[in-house]
Image (cartoon, rainbow, N blue to C red):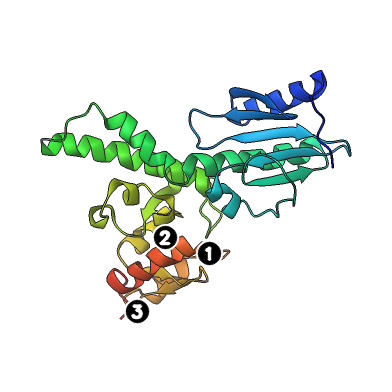
Amino acid sequence: MTVENPQSFVTSQECDKASSQNGYRREQGETDGWRRYGSTTAQGSIWLAYDDAGFWLMALDHSGVVAELGFEPLQFDGPGLACYSFATLTELYSVMPRVYQLSASLPDAPLREFQEKTKELFNATEAERLVIQRVGQQIFRDGLIDYWQGCCPLTGISDTALLRASHIIPWKDCPSDSERLNVHNGLLLSALWDAAFDRGLVTFGDDGRPVFSTALSASAVQELRWVNPILLTDKHQERLAHHRTEIFQGS
């Protein structure tokens, strides 16, 4: 596998278009046939290239994205931490939105956005603290919408008005802003599930399946319908262990 070096006009134009349409609008030059791009709203860089076998290549340097993207990287020398191959531009385009969503939502992108938006706000009075908290909660919600791809992972509901940003460890119990804004400390749940989860009437096992409190009536359990277990990372599981022991009303 040999990367086209330097890129042809057509290749460079396609790379620029793919990156720009998917949130990476900061062109950072070309090295050894790889065009590098950054974003003002997402962490890390991506590199795009084209090889002599007719495949499009994408390299990433965000370890969190590499860990959660769900694709097997190539064994290939190139920039970044991992490289992926796509037979067509359509295949490349199908993956790039998820790369951007993860880059924009995984730690510490929401924290940096929060710090930037609140750096000139005062934290002296209760009213000022509430303003800062609302800013943080909106950033957290936006991050969860990106991370969970705009739908409740349990029910599949994607109506934004019906989705809630559910903290696993509650906002008030988090030791830092970093933890409050960490998408691994959150689930994007539909409103009824959020109410039950927030009050400890339901929790989730490490397999992502719901566990209901005996305090719930049979009719309430029947109304809490779900389609799929939640796909949890080890980071979610760690925080859900706290929820099960400290918040869940098991009996």
Which residue of the protein is positioned furthest toward the left in this rendering? 125
The residue lying at 70 percent from left, 39 percent from top is: 58
Mark 1 — residue?
226
The residue lying at 50 percent from left, 70 percent from top is: 209
**From mark 1 to mark 2, how far is it between C-alphas?**
9 Å
Mark 2 — residue?
193
The residue lying at 38 percent from left, 44 percent from top is: 140
Total numbered circles: 3
Residue 231 x %, y %: 55, 62
**From mark 3 to mark 2, how far is it between C-alphas?**
16 Å
- The quadrant of the picture occupied by the N terminus is top right
Residue 162 x %, y %: 44, 47
Q: Earlier in the sequence, mark 3 or mark 2?
A: 2
Instruction: Check contact, mark 1 vs mark 2: CB within 8 A.
Output: yes
Q: Earlier in the sequence, mark 1 or mark 2?
A: 2
Q: Nearer the viewer, residue 71 or 127?
A: 71
- Left or right of 34 in this view: 155: left
Determine whether 184 is above or below 133 in the image: below
Under tag 2, what secondary structure?
A: helix
Mark 3 — residue?
214
